[in-house]
Structure formats: C-alpha cells, structure tokens
Amino acid sequence: MTPTFRGGNNIAMKLPRAQFDRTVAFYRDILDMEVTENSDETVAEGVVQSAAVRFGPVTLWLDRVDNYAHADLWLELFTDDVDRATEHLAAHGIPVQDELEPFPSGMNAHWISNPVAIPHIVRLPDNS
C-alpha cells in the first residue's frame, strides 16, 4: 500500500549571516507580515538565529546558518507512515539524507531531496 503524502505547515529558508537581517526586514518592514524573532531558542543544530514569518496558512522560517554561502529552501512533507514512506521513496530512487541536519531526540522523520536538490523533511503531522 502506498503511503500518503501532503504538504506540511512549515517552509524553512536557510540564509547566510550576511543576508539574514535584510531578509527578515523584507518580510517584516516591506511586506508588513507578522514576524516573530527567535534568537534565544535553539531551533536546530547549526541554526544561529531564526525568525518565524506568518506566510498565509504556513510558517516561513528564516534560519540564519553562518556556514552557508547562499540561501536554500527546505520543505516539509507529512505522511501517515514514515517507515513505509521511506521504503516507497527508496524504491523510486530517493534516498534518505539524514546527514543534512540532525533531528531532535526521538523524532521519527527523515530528510530527502527532490530531483533539483531541495531538502524535504518527511514526518508525521503533529496531531498524530
């Protein structure tokens, strides 16, 4: 049986240090979107600073990653079964890439990339 997939609630834009402040200001000051800066919390390993932008029905995370040379977009996919989804993707030549970024302890998820190298987290929705 094929697992189900659907877009998640989060998109992450990984930004180099030199682009972070201007990008936050673009969404907050120019587009007048609701922006919450999270500089005191650790979001993920390697993320120095983060801001959450209310981007319609999703949250756009602006993550400052100091060792990045250019911006990178990361997407979230929800599935009903992470193990079956991983097997299904592998059967179609999409390998797990969990080396992209560590997960919080106990999180059942995997990183994959689409054919043009955009990372996707494959995980259960929060309410499951």
Image: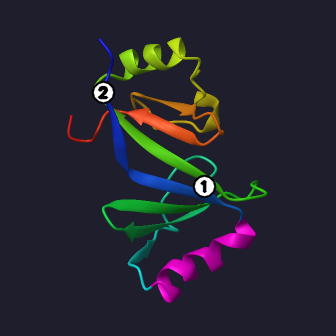
9 in magenta: no
Q: Is residue 30 above or below residue 92?
A: below
Q: Is residue 12 above or below residue 101?
A: below
Say which of marks 2 and 1 sits in front.
Answer: 2
Report the span colored magenta. 17-31
Q: Quadrant of residue 6?
A: top left
The amino acid at mark 2 is: Thr
Q: Nearer the viewer, residue 69 or 108?
A: 69
Residue at point 44% right, 16% down? 88
Q: Residues within 10 Å of mark 1 (few under 14, many from 20)?
A: some
Residue at point 65% right, 39% down? 116
Give the percent coordinates (x, y) of residue 97: 60, 28
Pointer 1: what residue? 47
Left or right of 102: which side holds 76? left
The amino acid at mark 1 is: Val
Find the residue positioned furthest to the left: 127
Q: Nearer the viewer, residue 101 or 88?
A: 88
- What kind of element bears circle 2? loop
Q: Residues within 10 Å of mark 2 (few under 14, many from 20)?
A: few
Of the numbered discs in the image, which one, if any, rests on residue 84? none
- What kind of element bears circle 1? loop
Task: Provide the major secondary structure of the magenta segment.
Answer: helix
Q: Quadrant of the C terminus?
A: top left
Residue at point 47% right, 37% down? 121
Residue at point 37% right, 23% down? 82
Pointer 2: what residue? 4
Q: Earlier in the sequence, mark 2 or mark 1?
A: 2
Q: Quadrant of the N terminus?
A: top left
Q: Quadrant of residue 107?
A: top left
